[in-house]
Each structure stands twice: as C-alpha cells, then as structure tokens.
Amino acid sequence: MAALNAELEEANRQLGFAYAKRKESRDDLRENLFKEEMGLILNNEGLIEGVTEKFLEFAETSRDKLIGRIVIDLLHQNFHDLFISELKNAWKGVSHQINVELNFEKGKSRPVEIKLTRISLDDRRLILAILR
C-alpha cells in the first residue's frame, strides 16, 4: 500500500508540473495573441526607408510623414541610447528584442517591443525593425 501511495504522489507531482507548464504556455499565448507585427526598414543612418501599413495605422500617420525621417525621432528620449546601441549591434549581425516607448503626433505614446535584424535587399544592407 505504501508503494502504491508513493507512485500516486509522484504521478500527482508530475501532473502538477504538466499543469503549470500548460498554464504558462496559455498565458504566453494570451499575451501575444493580440499583438500584431509591424515593420520598418532602416538604412545605415537610421532613416526610415520603408514602413508597413499596420505601422501606419498604429502611428495614425501617413507614409510621406515617415519616409526619410530618422527613427530615433519616434522614440521617447529615455530610450535613445538603448536603441542606438541595439542598432549598432544589429549592423554587426546581433539581434535582440528591446522594449521602448514610441511618441506620436498629438502627444500619444505607446510601448512596443522592437527586434532589429540586418537584412540584404537589392544588394544593400538594411535593418528590418519588427515591432509588436
């Protein structure tokens, strides 16, 4: 009876681990489910060369107001140094995800996650900024 009880306790413990893992996965899915990915294409000077429609909707602005603008102008001042550091890393081929706050016209600001990745396009090296 003691051996059977020990097996039952182990099975319950394993079930508890499985339940916790499943709950963690569910929470991650909920957190990311409604986040849409948006993108910017940046040149080596940090100028915006391309922008997705989703980003235009998010920023509530037009493409012509963003193309040619330096991306750092969109960031809250507290995140400038972090972003510049990550931009330099991305040019070296090292990508990280960082959390920043974007400032928009009309005084709006929104937190976003950004991942910067070096890409090649038309024989040019650029940075793809994926935002969520």
Image: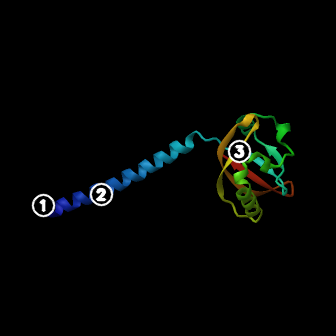
Within-10-Å neighbours for mark 2: few <14, some 14–19, many 20+ = few
Within-10-Å neighbours for mark 3: few <14, some 14–19, many 20+ = some
Residue behind mark 3: 102
Location of the N terminus by quadrant is bottom left
Amino acid type of the residue tagged 3 in the rendering: Leu
Q: Is residue 13 left or right of residue 29?
A: left
Residue behind mark 1: 1
The image quarter containing residue 55 is top right
Residue at the spot 84% in from the left edge and 50% down from the top edge: 47
Q: Secondary structure at mark 2?
A: helix
Q: Where residue 74 appears, x then y in whole percent? A: 76, 45
- In this rendering, the answer to whether 105 lies above or below 68 is above
Between marks 3 and 2, how big is the CA–CA gap? 45 Å
Between marks 3 and 1, how big is the CA–CA gap? 63 Å
Residue 93 in view in this figure = yes
Location of the C terminus by quadrant is top right
Residue at the spot 33% in from the left edge and 53% down from the top edge: 16
Q: Where residue 126 appears, x then y in whole percent? A: 81, 55
Residue behind mark 2: 13
Q: Where residue 53 appears, x then y in whole percent? A: 75, 37
User: Mark 2 or mark 3, which is nearer the start of the sequence?
Assistant: 2
Amino acid type of the residue tagged 2 in the rendering: Arg
Q: Are marks 1 and 2 in contact (CB under 8 Å)?
A: no
